[in-house]
Amino acid sequence: MIRRGSSDSRARMSGGRPCAGCGRPIKGGLYCESCLEKFRERAKVQGERMEALKSNALKKVAEDRGEVVILIVNSDERNLSITKIVLERGLTDYKIITANNPLTMINTLLSREINLVVLDADYNGLDMLRRIREDNRFKSLPVMMMSGSTRREIVSDVFSLGVQDYVSKPCSPKDLVGRVNKLITGKEEPALSTAKPAKPAATVETSSKSSFRILLIDDDIFDLRQERESLQNRLPCEITSAQSAAEGMRLLENNGADLVLVSLDMPFINGLKFLSLVNNNPKLRSIPVIIMTETRDFAVVSEINKSSAAGHVKKPNFTENGLGFIESVLRKRR
């Protein structure tokens, strides 16, 4: 016999069945919506606890190993791979890991202890930096930002979001490794050198004049970076760079140089026009000028050969012959 007032009785009287959780009458199923919501909330809390336990366990393993972990985040796979190779070769005691999108980055930061994040403003780095700083868990996380941009607003945004170092590109592998290591240890470590093997002692100059002064002019910032790195890896040189012929002429007039390398294809004043400006200045006409170009057009090459240029080299990746030619022109100046 069913008691009057029981949940079962009330459910039957309403034409339904009792909820298995609270006993309220329901039309179908085992649980009412209120009980189902409680179960969902409980499962969510349990899931978060499990994730926290997993994260803490992974962090403890890393701490027990004394492992220093650097996370490189870059949406461009090629640049991501290059940066990873440079840091792995230069910092062999550190673990270098990567992420190519914001979701992977956040999941990585949640799952393990990260000592430093390396971002690139040219490849969504600013957006990823904002995501890091918007999360209270990562507000104090050390971040290094790389960028080839010279725009003031970008630099201002980067520092307003809080970074420990800002690396202007082009940056040599040695400089990058040294600055990353300095952020982690407080001191620079000799980095892996990508320079060419040293020349025999008889041809190595040891005087204070061994450092050549080169003015590099190219409106393409990415080509400029590659050209600078190629020269620095091959020659003892001090490089001043400009992204326009007008800026290059101002630097040349104020500071002089042992050699000028200028790109042929630039807007307004190209390489050959810049050469004529140098020739028309009595104080500068003795400085050799080498034209950099990607063209194989016979007419263009012939025009360069007929000019007063010291010669021409292929850009932006200088060949071994090109670097040898540049070095020979410089050494004639000494």
Image (spheres, rainbow, N blue to C red):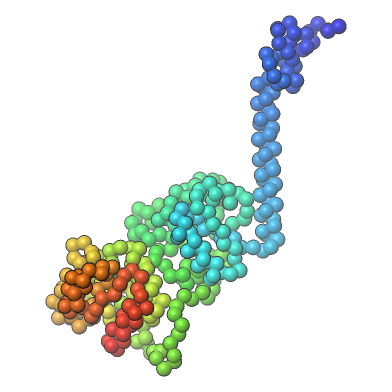
Q: Position of residue 65 (x, y in %)?
A: 69, 63
Q: Is residue 239 left or right of residue 105?
A: left
Note whether 162 is above or below 250 in the view shown.
above
Specify the quadrant of the image occupied by residue 187: bottom right
Quarter of the image with the N terminus is: top right
Q: Is residue 3 left or right of residue 254?
A: right
Q: Position of residue 41 (x, y in %)?
A: 66, 31
| Foreground of the two, 218 or 238 | 218
Q: Is residue 185 left or right of residue 273?
A: right
**Is residue 247 something one can see in this rendering?**
no
User: Which residue is outermost to the bottom?
Assistant: 202
Quarter of the image with the C terminus is: bottom left
The residue under the point 35% across, 53% down is 153
Q: Position of residue 212 (x, y in %)?
A: 33, 81
Note whether 86 is above or below 43 in the view shown.
below
**Is residue 244 something one can see in this rendering?**
yes
User: Which residue is outermost to the right?
Assistant: 1
| Foreground of the two, 268 or 151 | 268
Q: How many marks?
A: 0
Note whether 12 is above or below 239 in the view shown.
above
Q: Is residue 7 left or right of residue 268?
A: right
The residue under the point 46% across, 53% down is 75
The residue under the point 31% across, 70% down is 315
Q: Position of residue 249 (x, y in %)?
A: 21, 71
| Foreground of the two, 330 or 249 | 330
Specify the quadrant of the image occupied by residue 113: bottom right
